[in-house]
Image: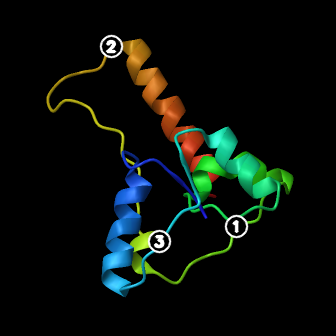
């Protein structure tokens, strides 16, 4: 099992899932390098626990295969784009926000 280091949100979600289920995972590889984590899986040395969105290109190309879980804690994460209340974004920032929103929406359809 490969996992990102402790500061990543997926680790917090996994800890909640472990606590809820009473099953605890001992990773063999912990790193903040996505390239190293995906290489670990591609080499056949283990599995990786990450949101599909993070490895979307490798899934689409067939390099990786996603296996769904039946754990509610692992299946209910969300992404949010946050702006300041009552503050109008500059035009460039607004256009960037629309682009990011469009990009993520295209990945989940």
Q: Give percent across and percent down for residue 21.
A: 37, 86
- Count residues near mark 1 (Cα–Cα under 10 Å), then give few for <14, some for 14-19, many for 20+: some
- Count residues near mark 2 (Cα–Cα under 10 Å), then give few for <14, some for 14-19, many for 20+: few
Left or right relative to 96: residue 62: right
| Cβ–Cβ under 8 Å for marks 1 and 3 | no
Left or right relative to 4: residue 21: left
Tell me the number on the disc at residue 23. Answer: none
Tell me the number on the disc at residue 75. Answer: 3
Element under disc 3: helix
Task: Tell me if residue 104 can be seen.
Answer: yes
- Earlier-in-chain disc, 1 versus 3: 1
Element under disc 2: loop
Q: Give percent across and percent down for residue 86.
A: 14, 28
- Earlier-in-chain disc, 2 versus 1: 1
Separation (CA) of disc 2 from disc 1: 38 Å
Separation (CA) of disc 2 from disc 3: 35 Å
Q: Residue at x 59, y 52 (%)?
A: 53
| Cβ–Cβ under 8 Å for marks 2 and 3 | no
Disc count in the image? 3
| Cβ–Cβ under 8 Å for marks 2 and 1 | no
- Count residues near mark 3 (Cα–Cα under 10 Å), then give few for <14, some for 14-19, many for 20+: few
Left or right relative to 72: residue 109: right
Q: Residue at x 24, y 21 (%)?
A: 88
Q: Give percent across and percent down for residue 84.
A: 19, 29
Task: Tell me if residue 78 can be seen.
Answer: no
Q: Which residue is mark 1?
A: 66
- Earlier-in-chain disc, 2 versus 3: 3
Q: Quadrant of residue 43?
A: bottom right
Given residues 38 and 86, the one toward you in this image is: 38
Q: Which residue is mark 2?
A: 90
Q: Give percent across and percent down for residue 77.
A: 41, 62
Given residues 96 and 18, the one toward you in this image is: 18
């Amino acid at each position: 099992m490969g996992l990102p280091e402790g500061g990543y949100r997926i680790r917090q979600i996994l800890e909640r899932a472990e606590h809820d289920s009473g099953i605890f995972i001992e990773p063999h590889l912990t790193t903040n390098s996505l390239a190293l984590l995906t290489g670990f899986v591609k080499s056949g040395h283990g599995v990786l626990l990450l949101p599909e969105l993070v490895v979307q290109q490798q899934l689409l190309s067939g390099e990786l295969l996603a296996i769904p879980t039946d754990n509610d804690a692992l299946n209910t994460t969300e992404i949010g784009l946050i702006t300041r209340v009552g503050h109008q974004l500059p035009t460039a920032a607004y256009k960037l926000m629309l682009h990011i929103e469009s990009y993520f929406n295209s990945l989940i359809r």
